[in-house]
Image (spheres, rainbow, N blue to C red):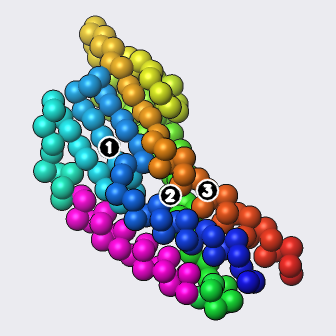
């Protein structure tokens, strides 16, 4: 087999996409909770599920079907010794680390400039951290929980395999 690592990337990616569980759990003071993956989301406020999450799931499931179709196509081509690079499953776990950094800068700088609301919390939260919000003379503290699930950590395996396949392919030429 010419592209064994790339084939492994597609097969493991397909298995991960088919598992209907969240990749990450967020909680803001226990008031607002989010269970999400690139293919589904659950939004809970005060213990009640939001309809917005169900609407978003329609779009996210369509994205799941699109990714599944591309992964199956990749498996077929690579099994026939034809190279096919589809990098979505490489990027999705990486975006889970980039998104909080973007949100951090938006909340810390734009909200402070526009609304004069001071928000303080670590740039990347994995686990439990306190968030402090100050507006005028009022200070509020909330516990922020941001925890990856085992499925998120498993989704890093295709990322590693994809990079390995690119390195090996580059060395061949």
Q: Which residue lies at the image location 18% right of the left edge and 55% below the top edge? A: 54
- The residue nearer to you, when weighing 71 against 139, is 71
* Residue picked out by circle 1: 35
Report the side of 29 relative to 44 (left or right). right
Tell me the quarter of the picture where residue 33 sits: top left
Q: Which residue lies at the image location 67% right of the left edge and 63% below the top edge? A: 161
- Main SS category, magenta section: helix
Q: CA distance from mark 3 to mark 1?
A: 21 Å
Residue 114 screen position, x and y as percent: 33, 32
Residue 118 visible in the displayed image: no
* Residue picked out by circle 2: 92
Looking at the rendering, the stretch of residues picked out in magenta corresponds to 56-76
Q: CA distance from mark 2 to mark 3?
A: 12 Å
Does 11 appear in magenta?
A: no
Q: Nearer the viewer, mark 1 or mark 2?
A: 1
Q: Are marks 3 and 1 in contact (CB under 8 Å)?
A: no
* Residue picked out by circle 3: 157
């Amino acid at each position: 087999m010419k592209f064994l690592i790339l084939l492994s990337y597609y097969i493991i990616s397909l298995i991960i996409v088919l598992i209907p569980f969240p990749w990450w759990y967020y909680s803001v003071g226990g008031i607002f909770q989010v269970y999400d993956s690139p293919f589904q989301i659950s939004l809970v406020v005060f213990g009640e599920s939001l309809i917005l999450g169900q609407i978003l799931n329609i779009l996210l499931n369509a994205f799941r079907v699109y990714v599944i179709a591309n992964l199956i196509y990749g498996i077929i081509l690579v099994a026939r010794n034809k190279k096919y690079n589809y990098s979505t499953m490489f990027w999705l776990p990486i975006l889970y680390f980039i998104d909080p950094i973007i949100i951090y800068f938006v909340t810390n700088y734009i909200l402070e400039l526009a609304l004069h609301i001071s928000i303080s919390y670590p740039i990347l939260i994995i686990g439990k951290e306190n968030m402090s919000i100050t507006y005028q003379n009022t200070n509020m503290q909330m516990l922020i929980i941001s925890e990856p699930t085992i499925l998120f950590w498993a989704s890093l395996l295709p990322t590693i395999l994809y990079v390995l396949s690119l390195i090996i392919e580059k060395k061949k030429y």
